[in-house]
Amino acid sequence: MSGFEQLFPGQLPRLVMFDLDGTLIDSVPDLAAAVDNMLLKLGRKPAGIESVREWVGNGVHMLVRRALANHIDEEGVDDVEAEYALELFNGFYEAGHELTVVYPGVRDTLKWLQKQGVEMALITNKPERFVAPLLDQMKIGRYFRWIIGGDTLP
């Protein structure tokens, strides 16, 4: 009996919605690389993967602001600098996702849910332009009927 069958005895849900980062994939290594390259371009010291791991979870705008502040509390960060830094970050992040990995068991779970006829949706803070290429690279995009990125809806 699968974990889903234990969680939903008798009948599986018709729809399961997943978050992306930290749920299906570990993207922190690539996020950290983009943050560190952004900081270096701005003449600052790299933050490192452990700091970035603490700062993720509230979208890329907040991640960049936290990196500029070098702290979870992003107060005092100049808005103009943050916008420029965000452009730099996006450029570095768009360059590739070689360090991102799918968590163990994710592909098997998605495949099993699909075989059971369960529809799946992906909802993420990540800007939409990054999502489809990343899902394709991770070979999990085909499982999702709906994808909502952080900038998909008004």
Image (spheres, rainbow, N blue to C red):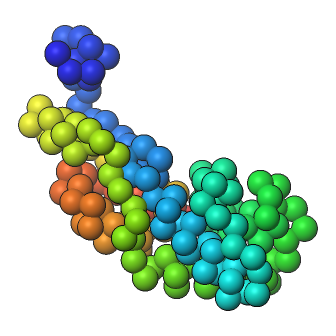
Residue drawn at the location 24% of the way across and 11% of the way down: 9
Reply above or below: 53 against 46: above
Residue drawn at the location 75% of the way across and 76% of the way down: 45
Can residue 123 be seen?
no
Taking the image as shown, residue 103 lies to the left or right of residue 58, namely left
Residue drawn at the location 45% of the way across and 79% of the way down: 94
**Which quadrant of the view contains residue 61?**
bottom right
Can residue 114 be seen?
yes
Q: Residue reaching furthest top? A: 10
Residue nearest the viewer, comparing 6 with 44? 44
Reply above or below: 8 against 117: above
**Which quadrant of the view contains residue 113?**
top left
Q: Could you say where residue 127 lies in the image, as x and y percent from the top left?
A: 49, 68
Q: Residue reaching furthest right? A: 76
Taking the image as shown, residue 36 lies to the left or right of residue 33, namely right
Residue nearest the viewer, comparing 5 with 100? 100
Q: In this figure, what is the number of numbered marks?
A: 0
Could you tell me which quadrant the N terminus lies in?
top left
Reply above or below: 59 against 46: above
Reply above or below: 25 against 94: above
Q: Could you say where residue 86 lies in the image, as x and y percent from the top left?
A: 64, 78
Q: Could you say where residue 24 lies in the image, as x and y percent from the top left?
A: 37, 47
Taking the image as shown, residue 59 lies to the left or right of residue 21, namely right
Q: Could you say where residue 129 lies in the image, as x and y percent from the top left?
A: 41, 74
Could you tell me which quadrant the C terminus lies in?
bottom right
Taking the image as shown, residue 147 lies to the left or right of residue 84, namely left
